[in-house]
Amino acid sequence: MSLLLTVIASTLLAGLAMPLGAMIARFEKVGNEWIEQEFRHSVMAFGGGALLSAVALVLVPEGIAHLNPLAACIWFMVGGLSFMALDIYLNKIDTPATQLAAMLSDFIPESIALGAAFATGSNNAFLLAALIALQNVPEGFNAYRELNASSAYKPQKIIIMFCLMAVLGPIAAMCGYLWLSESPEIIAAVMLFASGGILYSIFQDLAPQVKLEKRWAPPMGAVFGFCLGMLGLMLTTS
């Protein structure tokens, strides 16, 4: 029971990073226009670095350990193609919730994998929880700004909605913990599916928005985000 509570608490805290990112975007005000732009672009770059570290340091290594190379590549590609199909569909219906959908598409499969990681006693469980939280802050930041640009969504409503969505993490994690802990191949497929989708999202949504002409700070956000993930891996394996 105590381990289950740990799973619930870890994924809930990781999910609450989404409204935290939204609140940063809500109250983010910088007087200088260029500094404000650099801050926003640096946040996006940080999110890309954190997402990339989750893929490179946890999801892919854990995923390929339980699948043969062909199956691993298939699930990875299916994840990328699925996220691309979702992106095309959202663009077709012209919704202002593209970043929101991408955020949830990352968060839910990662939470399932996190629940299973705790159940199997993986050393990377807490690292994965930390990386999910790290990536949810900038994703919440970007999703809030996208939704707030539409007059249909008021700031308070967006933040409350993000708080409610944080509950999806514990629900998904409990599914992984209770039902998938004895199926390492399924968990591996979920991890690789999420990895392919995350990699698509990085280069489709985040990386193109990072660069600013004659400004070099934003890319360092990606370096910093990945570095934190690397540090977490080194601390958990030392």
Image (tube, grey):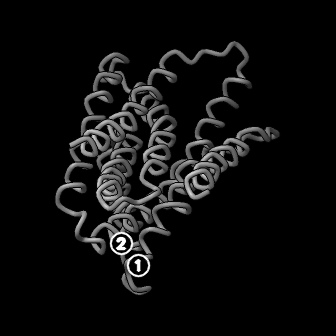
Please give the name of the residue rendered at 58% of the width and 40% of the height, measured from the top-left corner.
44
Q: Please, what secondary structure does the residue beneath circle 2 have?
A: helix
Q: Which of 93 and 227 is in front in this view?
A: 227
Considering every residue shown, the one lying at the far top of the view is 31
Q: How crowded is mark 1: few (under 14 residues within 10 Å), some or many (20 or more)?
A: many
Tell me if residue 233 comes above or below residue 1 in the rendering: below
Q: Name the residue nearer the viewer: 75 or 179.
A: 179
Q: In the image, what residue type sits under mark 2? A: Val
Q: Which of 176 and 39 is in front in this view?
A: 176
Quadrant hosting residue 68 = bottom left
* Residue in the picture at 42% in, 66% down: 80
Residue position for label 1: 72
Q: In which quarter of the image is the C terminus?
A: bottom right
x, y (%) of residue 200? 48, 61
Report the side of 184 relative to 212 (left or right): left
Residue 212: numbered disc: none
Circles 1 and 2: CB distance less than 8 Å? no
Looking at the image, is 187 positioned above or below residue 136?
below
Instruction: Choose mark 1 or mark 2, whichever is in front.
Output: 1
Residue 95, quarter of the rendered image: top left
Regarding residue 41, the answer to whether it shows in the image is: yes
Residue, disc 2 = 78
Residue 40: give x, y in percent of width and height.
Answer: 61, 31
Task: Please identify the quadrant where the N terminus is shown.
Answer: top left
Residue at position x 38%, y 55% from top? 87
Horizontal and vertical percent position of residue 161: 28, 27
